[in-house]
Image: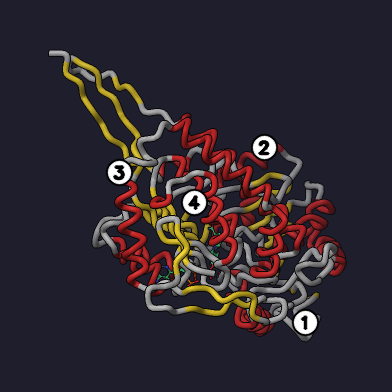
Amino acid sequence: MELLIGGRRRAAADGSTFVVREPSTGQELATVSQAGLNDVNAALIDATTAFESGVWADQSATARGRVLLRVADLIRQNAEELAVLEARNAGHPIADARWEVEAAAGTFEYYAGAANKLFGEVVPVQDPGIDVVLREPVGVCGLIVPWNFPLLIACWKVAPALACGNSIILKPASLTPLTALRLGELLIEAGVPEGCVSVLPGPGGVIGDALVSDRRVNKIGFTGETSTGASILRASSENITRVSLELGGKSACVVFADSDWEKAAAETPMAVFANAGQDCCSRSRIVVERSIYDAFVAEFVRTTERLRIGEPLDEASEISTMISPGQRQVSIDYIGIGTGEGAELVSGGTLPREDGSYLTPAVLAGVDNGMRVAQEEIFGPVACIIPFKDESNAIHIANDIPYGLSGSIWTKDLGRAIRVSKAIRTGALSVNSNRSVRIETPFGGYKRSGLGRQLGMHAMQHYTEVKNVFFSSE
Ligand code: NDP
């Protein structure tokens, strides 16, 4: 597959390509053009020219919204193709991939409607006249995304950026560029002006860094590792480029004895092990009141061991392969670190198949929150179950971590739900549920989990600049 530069398919300027593999087999899935610095420059010229011409930014917000609705329709019309591509390239169970594609369409639908609902303000100032606050598109947006939810996370950035009238250059992860390239084609087919859309697969250290460092880029929207986010912040400081960062997590699911804890034990395994644990919102620290700890662990393990592990295209699969042998090895190493620190491996951690990068969900019990397995993001199917003695101890454990992305509280006591949800320092919490990402609500992190919020109307703030204009009546 070729690059998309200014809406048109092109080979890389230097002719480079790279091989994209199917993680379930390790076999080649596609050969993709590999962008270099000349391609970044070409995309930036097109994006800047398109933005300055007003071909997209000067259309009415309603007109932009109509185009984004067509994108949603086109995603749905091509849903099965996209889902199969995502399942094969990212190793997702096909049922999950179908859900992700529908959520991708829903994201465009939401921002189609949001486009003409981002209002400015009229401020009652003391000077005679009228003072208005305008929201204007920020300009050229470099959008850098990871491999764990390649299409969906791309849409979370592309849709609000376009809704606000910006040009976009999308940099997919090198392991998973295929659905991003297809999305780029659908944007053009829907009517987004060509110059406003480029998709540049290529090494993050080259393409990503070039986007972050170039003064023609006005905004970087990034999702990925905390360490990469920190290097992006440093690189963006030269030009004071606007940056929003969605980074790692190590979220707590706090289960009180007064909750429907059997329900929590039945539902929480998929909150850790879905997408083979490669999920920034994974509730990988399960913090359980001591009086129910043993019974909870037993029920959690029973549910975990019933999860169906299978190939991505098997309709029955609930968990499939990890993205790569290297990513699996990280989890295996952490299981060893955890048992070496004194935790007990009570289930999983074995290799169920010879092919691919499969790993059975691993459950570590008797974990202390100070252990490395509890403090560091593993990004794989490893659950740490940590006991607590009372409410304040539960809050302390939930907060005693450098991250703050999501989390859950299970309790039937409303007062406790309010107290604990106010006390936990994290960007998204669910009470008696493990879901924390919704198109309509802000999503992002406290502490080392990021900067800014995506989704909901909050994302629109990040893709606009604020301009104040005073009209004198004197
Ligand atoms: P990385 O940070 O390694 O990569 C993310 C993207 O950044 C890729 O496109 C990568 O390109 C690119 N990149 C790499 N180096 C640079 C650089 N120096 N400058 C600019 N761009 C660069 O993350 P992963 O792909 O490994 O994704 C997993 C991580 O993402 C986990 O830590 C996870 O928690 C986090 N994540 C956070 C989410 C959130 O919303 N908070 C959601 C999902 C994931 P290339 O692929 O070519 O290396």
Please report contact status of discs 1 and 4: CB closer than 8 Å, yes or no. Answer: no
Mark 3 Cα-neighbour bin, 10 Å: few <14, some 14–19, many ≥20: few
User: Is 195 situated above or below 348?
Assistant: above
Instruction: Read off the residue under disc 2.
Output: 415
Q: Nearer the viewer, residue 3 or 359?
A: 3
- Tell me the amino acid under the disc marked 2: Gly
Alpha-carbon span between mark 1 and mark 2: 42 Å
Instruction: Find residue 119 and report its horizontal and vertical position in percent.
Output: 41, 28
User: Is 162 situated above or below 339?
Assistant: above
Considering only order in the chain, which callout, 1 or 3, is on the residue closer to the N terminus? 3
Q: Name the mark nearer the viewer: 3 or 1.
A: 3
Q: Is there any visible trace of residue 341 in the rendered image?
A: no
Which disc is residue 157 wearing? 4
**Element under disc 3:** helix
Which disc is residue 350 wearing? 1
Alpha-carbon span between mark 1 and mark 4: 36 Å
Residue at image location 56% in from the left, 73% down from the top: 175
- Tell me the amino acid under the disc marked 3: Ser
Alpha-carbon span between mark 3 and mark 2: 56 Å
Q: Name the mark nearer the viewer: 4 or 3.
A: 3
